[in-house]
Image: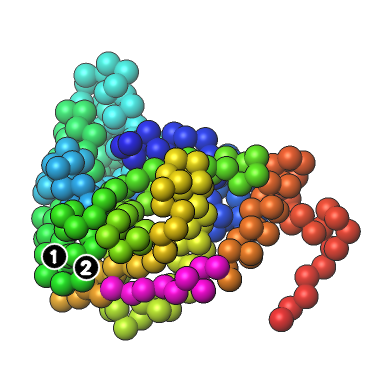
Amino acid sequence: MIYDDYDKIDAVRNSDLGWFQMSPALYKLKVLDKPEKRETSFFSVGSAVHCKVLEPALYDKGYVVTSAQRPSNKQQVRFVENFLSGADAGIEDIDFLKKDSFMIAYSTDKMSDAKMEQRAQEVYEAVKEYIDLKLEEDERTMLSEGQQEVVENCSLSVSQHKLANHILLDNSWAECLNEFTIEWEFKDMKCKSRLDRLIIDHNNKKIMLVDLKTTSKHLIDFPGEYKTFDYERELTFYSMAIAHYIFNERPDLKEYDPEFYIVAVETLPVHECEVFQISNEDIMQRGEKLKNLLDDLRWHYKNDKWKYKRSYYEGNQFEILD
């Protein structure tokens, strides 16, 4: 299943739980109200590394290297959006589109017409290559030459690490499922998970979850990122998806032992790669907390109350600071 199809599935995913863990109100704002999402440069590179390593045959279909500069600020973003909207509507007068887009994106109260036209031309020239690429209806994610170099170096680093290569790239020794989607339910609440790589080792009767992470920090700081971004919750959520998959579709795997790994690679020079194993005990212990979190989310869906936490509506209107 391609990512766009996965993204359209109406179900709870791990990243949604991060918002809910902060507050139901944030969950409603960020997930239920679904504001337009903009992909940052960092996530473009991270997604590109995932594709290059896990789905290399799709890389050229999803990414294009270009010298075109993305809009670098909010005003340029609005300028480009209005320009493209006008072009899509059939407006062919480039000078009109430039001036109209500039007036919408920038403050022009004290500008003469000549100054406005000059500034509109300057902005247009700064984003022209980007606009031209969009007008060609190329839906691929754009990467700069520098970003492409990072992607290549990260991919190479993974391939040169003996264990990372074995568990992420070598398909010869086990049943390997990349970018594997599992639709599942917690009680009656629909959930979904997209696993970077699921390895079913029939020889050793193991089922291994391998998650690829890129980091813009040095790997010595990765244990801190593991806590900050709550990767333990993510892996535990995935473990519940795997359990559902085994129970409903692969009963032949019931006696297989689970293992959990993160392959982390730096987007910084020198693009070091390291493999981390997470203990089954940690995943099992986190499981109870995660089930409680999912129970609370299920309650909010059933009662359609999002301003406060469940405990508030059930009579506990204060929190205790630890």
- Label of residue 159 in the image: 1
- Please give left or right for residue 236 compared with residue 206 in the image: right
Q: Quadrant of the N terminus?
A: top left
At x 47%, y 35%, the residue is 9
Kind of residue sitting beneath label 1? Ser
Q: Is residue 6 left or right of residue 54?
A: right
Q: Position of residue 268 (x, y in %)?
A: 21, 72
39 or 120: nearer the viewer: 39
Q: Residue at x 15, y 55 (%)?
A: 172
- Pick whichever, 118 or 142, lies toward us: 142
Q: Which residue occupies 35% across, 81% down?
A: 221
Label 1: which secondary element: helix
Query: Tag 2: residue type?
Result: Ala
Name above or below for residue 184 compared with residue 225.
above
296, 145: nearer the viewer? 296
Q: Position of residue 275 (x, y in %)?
A: 28, 73
Labelled disc at residue 316: none
Q: Which residues are magenta?
A: 275-284
Q: Position of residue 26 (x, y in %)?
A: 61, 53
Residue, disc 2 = 164
Is 58 above or below relative to 267? above
